[in-house]
Amino acid sequence: MYSPLLYQPVFILAPSLALALLIGIKPPQTNWTKTNAAPTDLVQRPSMQQNDASAQIEEGNRRATVGRWSEAVEAYQRAIELDPSLATAHGNLGHAYTQLGQFQEAISSLLRAISLQPENAVFRYNLGNAYLRFSRSAESIEPLTEAIKLKPDYFPAYNDLGNAYAELGRYPEAMMTLQHAIRIQPRSALAYYNLGVAYYDAARLKEAAESLKRAIVLNPAYAQAYADLGLVYLRLRQYKSAVDALEHGVQLTPDDSRAQYHLGAAYLALKKKDSFWRQYAVVKTLESDLATRLYNGFYQDRLLILGRKEKSRLP
């Protein structure tokens, strides 16, 4: 099973643009990524900031919206040089660093932004998101919780907080938090997917299946939910259902080697030899080590299922 999905961090626009948007990653149904439709937050920058610094923020935001993150970093840094007290510039710089995978720099910038605007829920959310992406789940709890205190219906913060609890093995809190996220956005396939992942990790497989099926109802093109539902069915030994889910998943994302592998495992469990060998050939073109596992599984007559956090490649 795949990792829980995070919302993208938020960047804050200068007054002429006036919205904080989630940007930079497409919906999960198209490329297995970590967000769906982007909510917005109205955030205004203080009017006393220098015009030149404001112009640099807007330039950085224009670069950010087209994914030119290094150039966005340079623009935000120029804004900070002009006005080091400009919280928006520090916050947006932290967002850009997150997109570049420079998490230490992101955290430093976001902490500076929070020191300048401690009541800003977006900055605190982005800090928690950065910690979570940097595999520092325990440190993400406080800023995400603070973001929710400042903005009680902050869906992205509930989503990421639930994922953080799940990563820490605090499953009751994860489930409660993700269920709250669903109450805020009851038609969020993302929230149902993440709840399914939490149930899976807690070995509550039937509930995991129900949550993943709900995610698929809400988003019929949600390839990752199909793939993980197939994995749940494999664990439940419901092999025909596993085949159905996995076949849907690989139709949507044929290059997903793990889903293709598990489809081969399901064929093996049903003793569909012809289908198994066709699937083996597909997996071999994608990842030879997984094909070796399928091959060995066939001759050892046993089903080999990858764990959710297990790397697909052999050591």
Image (cartoon, rainbow, N blue to C red):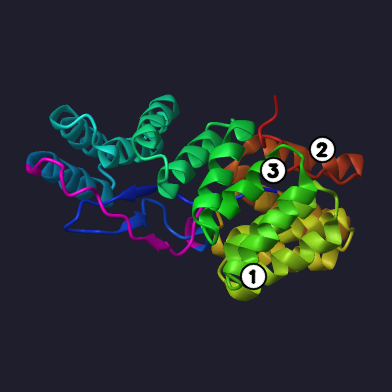
Which residue is the extreme one toward the left?
A: 52
In percent of the image, x 70 and y 64: which residue is there? 212
For residue 46: magenta?
yes
Q: Are marks 2 and 3 in contact (CB under 8 Å)?
A: no
Residue at the disc numbered 1 = 216
Dot 3 crowding, Cα within 10 Å, few <14, some 14–19, many 20+: many
Q: Which is nearer the eye, 137 or 143?
A: 143
Of the image marks 3 and 1, the number of the one nearer the N terminus: 3
The amino acid type found where label 2 is placed reads Asn
The amino acid type found where label 1 is placed reads Ile
Image spot of residue 202 (x, y percent): 82, 48
Residue at the disc numbered 3 = 165
Q: Which is nearer the eye, 182 or 247?
A: 182
Query: The C terminus appears in which quarter of the rendering?
Result: top right
Instruction: Give the extent of the magenta segment.
Output: 30-51
Residue at the disc numbered 2 = 296
Task: Using the numbered discs, state the Cα–Cα distance from disc 2 to disc 3 in whole angstroms.
Answer: 36 Å
Task: Using the numbered discs, state the Cα–Cα distance from disc 3 to disc 1 in whole angstroms.
Answer: 24 Å
Q: Which of pointers 2 and 1 indicates the residue nearer the eye?
A: 1
The amino acid type found where label 3 is placed reads Tyr
Q: Which of pointers 3 and 1 indicates the residue nearer the eye?
A: 3
Of the image marks 2 and 1, the number of the one nearer the N terminus: 1
